[in-house]
Every structure is written in C-alpha cells, then in structure tokens.
Amino acid sequence: MLAADGSVGGLIARRGRRAKLVQARESPWRMQYRSAWFRGSVMSKESELAEIRHAVRQLCAQYGEDYWLELDRSNDYPTEFVKELTTSGFLTVLIPEEYGGAGLGVLEAAAVMEEVCRSGAHAGACHAQMYVMGSVLRHGNDEQKLKYLPKIASGELRLQSFGVTEPTTGTDTTSLKTTARRDGDSYVVNGQKVWISRIQHSDLMVLLARTTPKEEVAKKTEGLSAFIVDVKAAEGNGLTIRPIESMINHHSCELFFDDLVIPRENLLGEEGKGFKVILDGMNAERILIAAECIGDGRYFIDKACDYARERMVFNRPIGQNQGVQFPIARCYADVEAASLMVDKAARMFDAGQPCGAEANMAKMLASESSWRAGDVCMQTHGGFAFAKEYHIERKFRETRLYQIAPISTNLILSFIGEHVLDLPRSF
Ligand SMILES: Cc1cc2nc3c(=O)[nH]c(=O)nc-3n(C[C@H](O)[C@H](O)[C@H](O)COP(=O)(O)OP(=O)(O)OC[C@H]3O[C@@H](n4cnc5c(N)ncnc54)[C@H](O)[C@@H]3O)c2cc1C
C-alpha cells in the first residue's frame, strides 16, 4: 500500500517482499508454481502501478490548471509542485533504495509522468530530475554517487539540467565546439550551449564538452567528456546564463563558458568517453517523454469528449456529428497504440534489454499522437480553444516540443532506417 501521506514508502516495503519471492521462486519445490506466481506478480505490478497513478492524480489535483496558467503567464517555476513531487517520492522513483530513492523502474516513472501531464500540468518543468540522475548512477564513481544521489533523493539538490545542444552544431552532437582543457587537477571550459532547460532551477548540470579535438580521435564519438557542474558556484565565475524567451514556459537558457574551472573530481565516467554517458541516459529520457505525450494525448481526448458532449449547436451536442466524433475517436486509437509501444519500451528497459529502437519509436509515435489529439481538441473547441482559460492552447504549445526535443522525428527515422532496417547510412 502507499503510505498514509501518499508517498511511495509503502511500495518500497513491498518491493522487499517481492525480492524474497524471487529468491523463493528459484527453489525446486516452487518451480511447478512458477507460472502461477508469475501471473500473480504481474497482477501485483499492475495494482502497484494503479496505486501510483491514483496517488499522483491526487497530488496533481491540488495544483489545478489555473496554477499552470499563471506560471505560463509569468514565466515562473512550479517550485511548490516540484518540491511536493520530490518529497512524496514520485520524482525520485528511479533512485535506488540504498541512496534514498524508491528503487522502482522506468515503468513506474513513466506512470508518474503520464499522470502529471494528464492532469493538465507541464512535466517539462521537472522531468529531467528523474533521468539526468541516471548518468551519475551508471557512470559516477562511488564518491560521486554518495555525494549526490542521497541529496537528490531528499530534494536537497536538484540535478535537472543537461548541457548538450550548441547553437552552431545542433543535432550533430559529436561536432560540438565547447572544449574542456585539462589543467592540473582541473578542466577549463570554453564555449557556448543553447536551450539548456531548468538551469536556473537546478543546483547541478551534466555538461558535455570536447576534451580531445575531433580530428585527433579515431571515432567522432570519442574525445567527448561529461562533467558534473556545480551551477551555483559556476555562475558569475566563468558561466553566464541568459534566458531565452520562448513559446512555452520551459526555462531554457543560453550558456556562455569563459574559462570556467571544473575540478577534475567532477569528471563523470572516463575522460573521452562522455558520449556514452549521455547516450546511456537517452533511452530512459525518450520513454519518459513519450509517457508525458501519452498523458497529454489523453488530456486532450478527455477535454475534447467533455466539450463535444456539452456544447450545443444547431440544437444538438456537437459530438453527435460524426464529423466531430470521428477525429476524436481516431486520436483515441492513435494514443492507445502509442501507449502500447511506451509500455513495451519501459518493460524492456527495466528488464535490462536493449531498447533503443523501442524507446525511439515510442517517443516518435507518442509525440505525434499527442500533437494530433491537441489539434483535434482545438478544432472541437472552435473559437474557445483560443481562450487561455480553457487551457488547451497552453498544452497544445507544450506538447509540440516533443517532436523536436530531445530529438527530432527525422533523427529517429534515420535511427530506425540505419540501425533497425540496415539501410545505408546518410550522415
Ligand atoms: C524548449 C526546448 C528545450 C530544450 N532543452 C534542452 C536541454 O535541456 N538540453 C539540451 O542539451 N538541449 C535542449 N534542447 C535542444 C533540443 O534537443 C534540440 O533543439 C533538438 O535536438 C534539435 O536540434 P536543433 O534545434 O539544433 O535542430 P537542427 O539540428 O538544426 O535541425 C533542424 C531540423 O533539421 C532536421 N535535420 C537536421 N539534420 C538532418 C538530417 N541529417 N536528416 C534529416 N533531417 C535533419 C532536424 O530533424 C530538425 O527538424 C531544447 C530545445 C527546446 C526547443
């Protein structure tokens, strides 16, 4: 059960029991019961997910759509919401129990993100707190993990910023121009980044920079290194942050590095192997963002159906017209189909199976289906879709992002073409 305060504490206790069951399953006398046990475990997993969804919905209900509208108007950050999502354990579900997190999987994390978006909230304000941490977890040394993870789990530290994209090189990540030059026990960073989100609301950032020129490495993915940057210490001491006025309230900024000194102990993983540090986190990121799109899609369909049932024109509810009904029904089918791919990718990720193709397909299908659902929701609402108090136009703007970031649809298609279908490489 969830703890009385709606946290995931109860789930942690139950996971302990499940671990014992896994051991018991290995004993010969239980072998004959294996399939029955497995069916039971699936049931229990589903009810665990249902409990998480229910609790997240309850939490989100305290932050209604007007809360998000006001933040959108003022470009402010949902500080109270993020704090509550963190202290109740939902934002730290992926952090292992030994570091103070819930130790759950991407499947549970995806359920959290989906429900946040379905409630009308903008999960982009905090989603990276879930997955950037994975770079430290998978590639950090023991000292780094002990230093950062418990504090991220408790909410004392926010690690929700990652600095990869640059203005001149964009999607061509291995051509990035920001350099980190080794100088004794430090690295000195120079260069520029763009669209780095939430940095003004983050204590730490994972930064990707080149430590060996591209011309001097055998493979273009080599010679890049990842660093943990203490943002508060860096700002004004080699790091300048300039917010970008943008279409959605995503707190994205330009960064300028001018001889920023980073201690060597902040190198994440091996020098020159930073591309892998970033790449390893991408599948979780794609799956979680896909889950957000599913939440958005379901939000739009709920809204469209409610309105289509109630709005009377020509003395009948507009939803009685099949010209209004069918587009909503098609979007429902689209979102449900995309949701199956998200679910598949999340389960593969949690089982430790390679899931690059599934994670990418989930992100692409979910982001396209949420966009179509947003468009149909707008159309269903007619002129009122443009009124901010209906909230749809804000969500419509927000969900559009995910066909572009963190990776654009074309790049996903190119991944599928080359790596799944073995078609000739184009770049
Ligand atoms: C609101 C927002 C928040 C963001 N947050 C972050 C963040 O926190 N951290 C971070 O590092 N980045 C962030 N980004 C950056 C984001 O990841 C990039 O915008 C995205 O990866 C696309 O890169 P680009 O904008 O440079 O597009 P470009 O690389 O310039 O591409 C432009 C278009 O051309 C297409 N294209 C390019 N090359 C090819 C090709 N070879 N074949 C076919 N099509 C191609 C692309 O698909 C795209 O549609 C954010 C962006 C936005 C808008």
Image: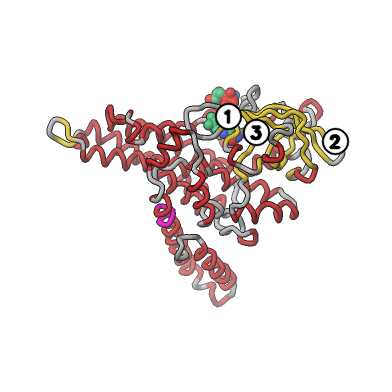
Q: Nearer the viewer, residue 408 or 97?
A: 97
Residue 302 spot, x, y in % from top left: 32, 43
Report the residue that reaches farthest toward the bottom.
Answer: 29
Q: Quadrant of residue 386?
A: top left
What amino acid type is highlighted by mark number 2? Asp
Q: Secondary structure at mark 3?
A: loop
Q: Nearer the viewer, residue 342 or 187?
A: 187
Instruction: Answer left or right for 223 relative to 55.
Output: right
What amino acid type is highlighted by mark number 3? Val
Q: Is residue 146 above or below residue 189?
A: below
Residue 59 spot, x, y in % from top left: 43, 53
| Residue 266: mark in rendering | none
Q: Residue at x 57, y 54 (%)?
A: 351
Q: Nearer the viewer, residue 198 or 138?
A: 198
Q: Quadrant of the C terminus?
A: top right
| Residue 164: mark in rendering | 3
* Label 1 or label 3, whichever comes before in sequence order: 3
Q: Can the viewer see residue 348?
A: yes
Q: Secondary structure at mark 1?
A: strand
Q: Quadrant of the N terminus?
A: bottom left
| Measured Cα–Cα span from mark 2 to mark 3 | 22 Å
Q: Residue at x 79, y 25 (%)?
A: 215
| Measured Cα–Cα span from mark 1 to mark 2 | 30 Å
Question: Does residue 403 belong to the magenta stretch?
Answer: no
Residue 109 spot, x, y in % from top left: 51, 51
| Residue 183: mark in rendering | 2
* Residue at disc 3, CB closer than 8 Å to ligand 1: yes
Residue 64 spot, x, y in % from top left: 38, 45
